[in-house]
Image: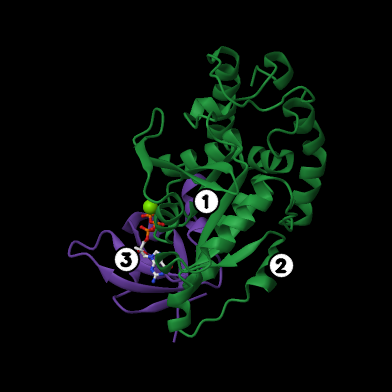
Amino acid sequence: MGLTYQSTGQLTTREMFDAKSDNCDYIIALAGNPNTGKSTVFNALTGLRQHTGNWPGKTVQRAEGNYIYKSHRYRLIDLPGTYSLLSNSADEEVARDFICFARPDATIVVLDATCLERNLNLALQVMEITNKVVVCVNLIDEARRKKIQVDAAKLSERLGVPVVSTAARSNEGLPRLIELVSDVASKRVCPKPQPVSYSKDLEEAIARLEPRVRDVIGKDINPRWLTLRLLDGDTRLLQAIENHLNAGRTAPVVHGRRRDYSNGA
Amino acid sequence: MSDTITLNCLGNGSIALVKEVVAEGLTRRRLLDLGLVPGTKVEVIRRSPVGDPIAFNIRGAVIALRREVAGKVLVSPWG
Ligand SMILES: Nc1nc2c(ncn2[C@@H]2O[C@H](COP(=O)(O)OP(=O)(O)OP(=O)(O)O)[C@@H](O)[C@H]2O)c(=O)[nH]1
Ligand SMILES: [Mg+2]
């Protein structure tokens, strides 16, 4: 990569994602495995006042909508359902790039309460990128029917992020979800995700590489996560970073709230 | 190890435990992300008439894999 964070000044802006930050105070992403109820949560929160279209340059459907809570305006972005953020399908790149580069004020990870084991993989991957996560254990009514109990408090303690159980189709738990999202977005609550620890060899490699990654990229992208991707040989992510660096330099400035980069690089 | 076969060789309704994923690169990443780590129980839900793709139950989700990709997963039949 020829470009560095310092040479271009700033990484990226939300405007690149068309997530226009005018007319809203907070940007909230909705992530989750396919079919976990993301769109149901989305519709319940935004009251179906959604705007659908495609992601810039991709044929992946996207929906965004707004809601107001305690006189703050929230913009909700429904990300494509994925099992992972690492396998480089178009859907996964959209979800990853949004969380990584648009840096939402909070990301809601919607899990299927009836198969948490499979769903937690994505939650952990999101939590490696950002700490601003609220976990929404949805389909809790289905789980009850199958005699599955989910201890949300325990899960929250183990993950290090707020957790709420919901049945989005019947609005159960959604008021609490809105409250938790507000806590995280406004920074009243600062989640501390349990870091995923890797094998000794890998941790040694991370320890060697991470300080250098930090020097180059600053703190806008979680340096530990980026180090892991480098060790993974994830060239698509490097390409995405380079695109965003270039675009950050040439993108027209769109009015609206901008991130404060002044103490960045 | 004599009972090790690949995931694509299982018949409808049979169950197996994952021993190893022998794919490389992105295919390996994808298989691991789908939950196919050693020790995972996998059930064959249905094979399409031509035998490709094959639908599996992996950790509570029904997931279709191409025969070629399923061939990269070593399993031992269970039960
Ligand atoms: N019983 C029950 N059903 C739900 C709940 N939430 C969503 N559903 C149903 O689950 C199905 C999938 O919901 P969606 O909201 O479309 O899920 P999604 O995550 O947006 O799915 P993709 O966008 O395809 O990944 C729909 O039939 C919903 O009505 C819930 O809390 N309880
Ligand atoms: Mg949806």
Q: Is residue A151 above or below residue A212?
A: below
Residue B72 point in image, percent of width and height: 44, 58
Please, which chain is the residue tagged with disc 2 on? A
Which chain letter goes with mark 3?
B
- The reply to whether the C-beta atoms of the residues labelled 1 and 2 are less than 8 Å apart is no
Q: CA distance from mark 3 to mark 2?
A: 33 Å
Q: Is residue A257 left or right of residue A81?
A: right
Instruction: Say which residue label 1 marks.
Output: B29
**Mark 2 residue CB less than 8 A from any atom of ligand 1:** no
Residue at mark 3 shares a chain with residue at mark 1: yes
Q: What residue sits right under mark 3 in the picture?
A: B55
Q: Which chain is green?
A: A
Q: Residue at x 40, y 78 (%)?
A: B15
* Residue A85 visible in the picture: no
For the point 56% across and 29% down, the residue is A14
Q: Which mark is residue A214?
A: none
User: Visible in this render: residue B14?
Assistant: yes
> Is the C-beta separation of discs 3 and 2 under 8 Å?
no
Q: In the displayed structure, would residue A180 be above or below residue A242?
A: below
Determine the secondary structure under disc 3: strand
Q: What's the colour of chain B in the image?
A: purple
A116 vs A54: above or below = below
Q: Nearer the viewer, mark 1 or mark 2?
A: 2
Q: Looking at the picture, tell me which residue is in the foreground, A26 or B45.
A: A26
Question: Which three-letter amino acid code belongs to the residue tagged 2?
Answer: Arg
Residue extending furthest front?
A: A71
Q: Which residue is mark 2?
A: A158
Residue kind at label 1, given as amino acid type = Arg
